[in-house]
Image (cartoon, grey):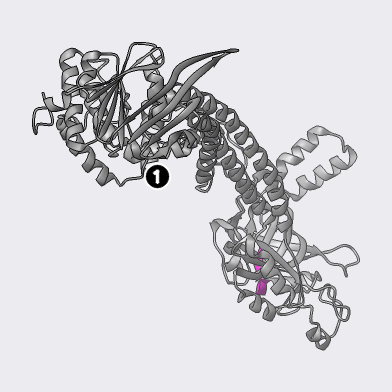
């Protein structure tokens, strides 16, 4: 019997028996939709969490530091080695090595992020805040998921860029002094703490402002400060993270040249500060987290130390793998329940059609042909149920997205559930499989129908 | 063509055994058209079921085209029926979801014959039974007589060795009954197909070449008729 004929006969039955078709399709579509929605939620939630974690933990970046494990001169901390010794130190993070890293496959950016230390920033109107001073190539900042909220990068000496955290919590010296003193004398005063917290989160417009950096002079006997030459704020970065968390991440970025000048003015001794073309830290941006390990290995061959936050991704993947399995389990459970409805509906249909089956047998259909016809019919019901399930799943996801949108997530970009295309064939495959498996019993039962029923009249 | 040898059949009802056919012997030649006549409960339907391989006799042998169908397995019998046996039912037994043409084609579907050949044969047979214009209609759109014509066309499509007709005119009025019998007689004459017509009506049986009469499970008479000479020459369909 030709496949086209089996399919046509099965389709005729599916079309004709609308109630049975409707019942079976309803059951299967619910199961199929459950699988698709469950997988989509799992997948979207994983992507969303990965994106959010990537934003905070930068999983697609490799932090490169000098190789501290080299016993001789060592790359870390200004060891006071002579210039000749320093040149021989194989663990140093140099501009030359960074250039090699920049040329590696999958590397989208590699820039020094020279950590010059934690210092105090003072504005013209005498507001101060503590922040981390970083020397880097300002033009490459946007390559590291930074977005300029205001302004942009500048090559000129004396220019600086602030991250959004550095623009909040600027308090004038007197207020700050007074608050600290009051908190010291009354540390459990909630009102004072609230006042301090609200001031810490208060934003200031720093764009195009002039600031000065100051550090305590270690050589000074009476605790005098060293003050830098004025810096012009040419850009404010929007890191896109949670604004409540921004106050804990305050950074000022300057060009490497400006950094050298500040090291000199503020007598900074952090890491390799002051050494030309030698850095204490660099960040390498990789095109995909999938290539991190490969790039990391290559960087390590340059006798450099690397660290990544990739373990976060693995942890998420492990967690979501469990969630996805559980979701799939729920979907399969619903399909099993749905399959019972198919078995019942198809068995009833078989019973109602036993005369027709008998006639077919009298006309020469063998058991295998009858069985195949019923299994094809069940598979067809499964496929139709699966297609309906896809429609349902889109409606359900649309509803969930509306609900999430109305509820609002409150932080970062909203979670939008999308149905990955790969889940559609998975849903259909499960639906067809359920149809076929549930059709086996009715099909065998049908094929065993006695042909005699065809010519016997009740 | 068909040989029934010493066939006995009985049913078991608890501890009790009821014999419905007793040592039946007869044979039908190729191209012959015979009637199996009997009243209700005479055993004629059981005899038809046994000859069609739908039941197995308690004793005896049934040969069709020199093959003993009693010894055949279920699947072998299906294959045998497909090739050698045609059926015409009292209630036509057409598949309501298929068109007239598709119903006629159905036995060939089980033989995996290509759609184009099937269609060609079905249309020729529908023309042969006088309803070429009904090919695309559904059975429910046809009268009883037209449905029986479809059933006749379906029985012929595999060019079987023998066609069993079970009360083919049982559901029809006398005018249509005459038409159907004439179609069968003409087909028998033209195509030399062997027909075994089971009926309880003497009027129908008398139009066959021979009559086997059954009564209470016994073959009581075998009568030769002269009906084959009464056909109207050349014309297959008589409206």
Q: Which residue is mark 1?
A: A3
Q: Decide if residue A250 is on the left or right side of residue B10.
A: right
The residue drawn where x is 55% and y is 16% is B12
Q: Is residue B55 visible?
A: yes
Q: Is residue A202 visible?
A: no
Does the segment drawn in magenta span residue A256? yes
SS state under label 1: helix
Name the residue nearer the viewer: B11 or A25: B11
The residue drawn where x is 9% and y is 31% is B235
Vertical placement of residue A132 versus B177, above or below: below
Vertical placement of residue A9 versus A158, above or below: above
x, y percentage for residue A114? Answer: 72, 69
Name the residue nearer the viewer: B166 or A444: B166
Name the residue nearer the viewer: A342 or A277: A342
Does the segment drawn in magenta span residue A171? no
x, y percentage for residue B185? Answer: 18, 27
Q: Quadrant of residue B161?
A: top left
Q: Which residues are magenta?
A: A253-258
Vertical placement of residue B27 versus A234, above or below: above
Q: Quadrant of the C terminus of chain B?
A: top left
Q: Decide if residue A277 is on the left or right side of residue A413.
A: right
Name the residue nearer the viewer: A330 or A454: A454
Question: Crowding near pointer 1: few (<14 within 10 Å), some, many (20+)?
Answer: few
The residue drawn where x is 67% and y is 69% is A294
Vertical placement of residue B217 versus A228, above or below: above
The residue drawn where x is 79% and y is 63% is A215
């Amino acid at each position: 019997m030709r496949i086209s004929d089996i399919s046509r006969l099965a389709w005729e039955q599916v079309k004709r028996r609308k109630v049975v078709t409707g019942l079976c399709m309803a059951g299967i579509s619910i199961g199929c939709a459950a699988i698709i929605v469950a997988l989509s939620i799992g997948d979207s939630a994983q992507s969303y969490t990965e994106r959010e974690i990537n934003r905070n933990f930068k999983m697609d970046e490799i932090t490169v530091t000098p190789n501290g494990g080299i016993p001789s001169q060592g790359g870390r901390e200004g060891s006071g080695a002579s210039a000749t010794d320093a040149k021989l130190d194989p663990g140093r993070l140099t501009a030359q090595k960074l250039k090699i890293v920049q040329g590696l496959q999958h590397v989208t950016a590699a820039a020094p992020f020279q950590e010059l230390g934690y210092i105090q920033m003072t504005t013209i109107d005498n507001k101060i805040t503590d922040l981390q001073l970083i020397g880097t190539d300002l033009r490459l900042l946007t390559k590291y998921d930074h977005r300029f909220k205001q302004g942009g990068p500048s090559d000129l000496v004396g220019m600086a860029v602030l991250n959004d955290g550095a623009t909040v919590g600027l308090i004038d010296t007197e207020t700050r002094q007074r608050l600290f003193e009051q908190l010291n004398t009354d540390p459990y005063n909630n009102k004072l703490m609230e006042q301090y917290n609200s001031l810490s989160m208060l934003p200031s417009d720093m764009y195009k402002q002039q600031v000065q950096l100051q550090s305590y002079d270690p050589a000074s006997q009476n605790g005098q400060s060293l003050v830098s030459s004025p810096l012009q704020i040419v850009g404010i970065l929007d890191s896109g993270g949670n604004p409540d968390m921004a106050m804990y991440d305050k950074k000022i970025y300057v060009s490497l040249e400006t950094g050298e000048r500040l090291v000199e003015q503020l007598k900074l001794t952090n890491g390799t500060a002051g050494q030309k073309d030698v850095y204490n830290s660099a960040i390498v941006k990789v095109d995909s987290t999938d290539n991190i390990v490969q790039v990391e290995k290559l960087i390590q061959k340059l006798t450099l130390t690397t660290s990544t936050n990739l373990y976060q991704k693995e942890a998420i993947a492990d967690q979501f793998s469990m969630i996805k399995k559980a979701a799939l389990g729920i979907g399969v459970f619903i399909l099993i329940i749905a399959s019972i409805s198919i078995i019942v509906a198809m068995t009833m249909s078989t019973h109602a059609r036993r005369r027709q089956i008998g006639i077919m047998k009298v006309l020469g259909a063998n058991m295998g042909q009858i069985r195949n016809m019923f299994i094809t019919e069940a598979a067809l019901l499964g496929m139709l149920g699966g297609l309906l399930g896809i429609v349902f799943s889109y409606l359900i996801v649309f509803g969930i997205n509306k609900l999430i949108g109305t509820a609002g997530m409150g932080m970062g970009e909203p979670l939008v559930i999308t149905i990955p295309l790969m889940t559609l064939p998975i849903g259909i495959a499960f639906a067809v499989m359920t149809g076929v498996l549930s059709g086996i019993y009715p099909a065998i039962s049908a094929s065993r129908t006695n042909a005699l029923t065809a010519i016997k009249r009740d | 063509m068909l040989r029934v040898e010493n066939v006995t059949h009985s049913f078991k009802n608890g501890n009790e055994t009821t014999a419905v056919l007793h040592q039946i012997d007869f044979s039908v030649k190729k191209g012959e058209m015979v009637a199996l006549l009997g009243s209700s409960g005479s055993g004629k339907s059981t005899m038809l079921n046994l000859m069609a391989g739908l039941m197995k006799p308690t004793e005896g042998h049934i040969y069709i085209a020199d093959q003993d169908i009693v010894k055949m397995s279920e699947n072998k019998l299906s294959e045998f029926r497909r090739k050698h046996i045609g059926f015409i039912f009292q209630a036509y037994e057409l598949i309501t979801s298929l068109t007239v043409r598709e119903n006629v084609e159905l036995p060939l579907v089980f033989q995996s014959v290509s759609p184009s050949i099937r269609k060609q044969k079905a249309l020729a047979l529908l023309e042969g039974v006088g309803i070429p214009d009904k090919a695309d209609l559904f059975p429910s759109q046809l009268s009883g007589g037209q449905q029986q014509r479809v059933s006749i066309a379906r029985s012929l499509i595999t060019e079987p060795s023998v066609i069993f007709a079970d009360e083919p005119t049982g559901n029809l009025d006398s005018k249509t009954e005459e038409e159907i019998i004439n179609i069968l007689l003409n087909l028998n004459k033209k195509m030399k197909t062997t027909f075994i017509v089971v009926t309880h009506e003497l009027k129908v049986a008398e139009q066959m070449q021979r009559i086997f009469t059954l009564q209470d499970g016994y073959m009581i008479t075998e009568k030769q008729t002269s009906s084959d000479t009464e056909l109207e020459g050349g014309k297959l369909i008589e409206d």
